[in-house]
Amino acid sequence: MIETAVITISDKGSQGKRIDRTGPEIENTLDRSKYNIAYYSIIPDEVEKIEKELCYACDDLKVNLVLTNGGTGFSPRDVTPEATLKVIEKDVPGIAEAMRMKSMEITPKAMLSRAVCGIRKSTLIVNLPGSPKGAVENLRFILPALPHGIDILMGWDSECAGKIQEGE
């Protein structure tokens, strides 16, 4: 089971001025036979608070996967990538590149995403867009690869190369 945290980053959501639709949509997209939602929170667009929340999920809760949503655009308050970069120990650019590439097939606005992905200790952190549609689309693009990456990260599977795939 992949222990997962969903963190919504929204000033209005954290103040109760907007209902978070994106976090629940992310949760509904995950196969509950593979992913356990161990933690969910809504926090404001503030670097220090985002850093603290990411560290809490990774270091204290020790979840395998953190899915953030919101704060990846061009607004002056969009600081999720900056906070994420401060806490990760290893960059995982391929996930963010894949999300942008696949999203570009849907909308040219995808190139405006500043989302980043990386590893802190034994946790994979993925920044998703703030809109429910964008978050779910991006999550669906990467879901097929996430279990294998987390298996390797956790030491549950040590084989990346050398496995013979059916049809080879």
Image (spheres, rainbow, N blue to C red):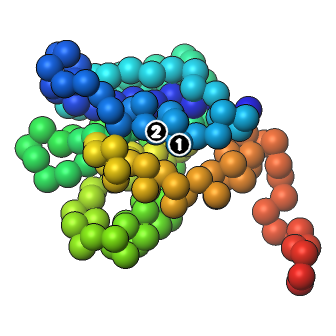
Q: Which residue is mark 1?
A: 29
Mark 2 secondary-structure assignment? helix
Q: Position of residue 94 (x, y in %)?
A: 50, 64
Q: Which residue is mark 2?
A: 26
Which of the two residues, 72 or 159, is positioned nearer the viewer here? 72
- How far is disc 2 from disc 1 in space, using C-alphas? 5 Å
35 above or below 135?
above
112 vs 136, left or right, is: left
Whether residue 46 is visible: no
Which of the two residues, 68 or 116, is positioned nearer the viewer here? 68
Indicate the amino acid at tag 1.
Thr
Asked if the residue under mark 1 is in contact with the one under mark 2, i.e. CB atoms within 8 Å, the reply is yes
Q: Image quadrant for the N terminus?
A: top right
Indicate the amino acid at tag 2.
Ile
Mark 2: give few (<14), some (14-19) or many (20+) Cα within 10 Å.
many
User: Residue 71 got which mark?
Assistant: none
Which residue sits at x=53%, y=42%? Answer: 29
Whether residue 83 is visible: yes
Outermost residue toward the left in this view: 76
Which residue sits at x=43%, y=37%? Answer: 25
Mark 1: give few (<14), some (14-19) or many (20+) Cα within 10 Å.
some
Q: Image quadrant for the C terminus?
A: bottom right
120 above or below 160?
above
Mark 1 secondary-structure assignment? helix
Specify the quadrant of the image occupied by residue 165: bottom right
Specify the quadrant of the image occupied by residue 71: top left
Which residue sits at x=43%, y=56%? Answer: 138
Q: Position of residue 56 (x, y in %)?
A: 46, 20
117 vs 110, left or right, is: right
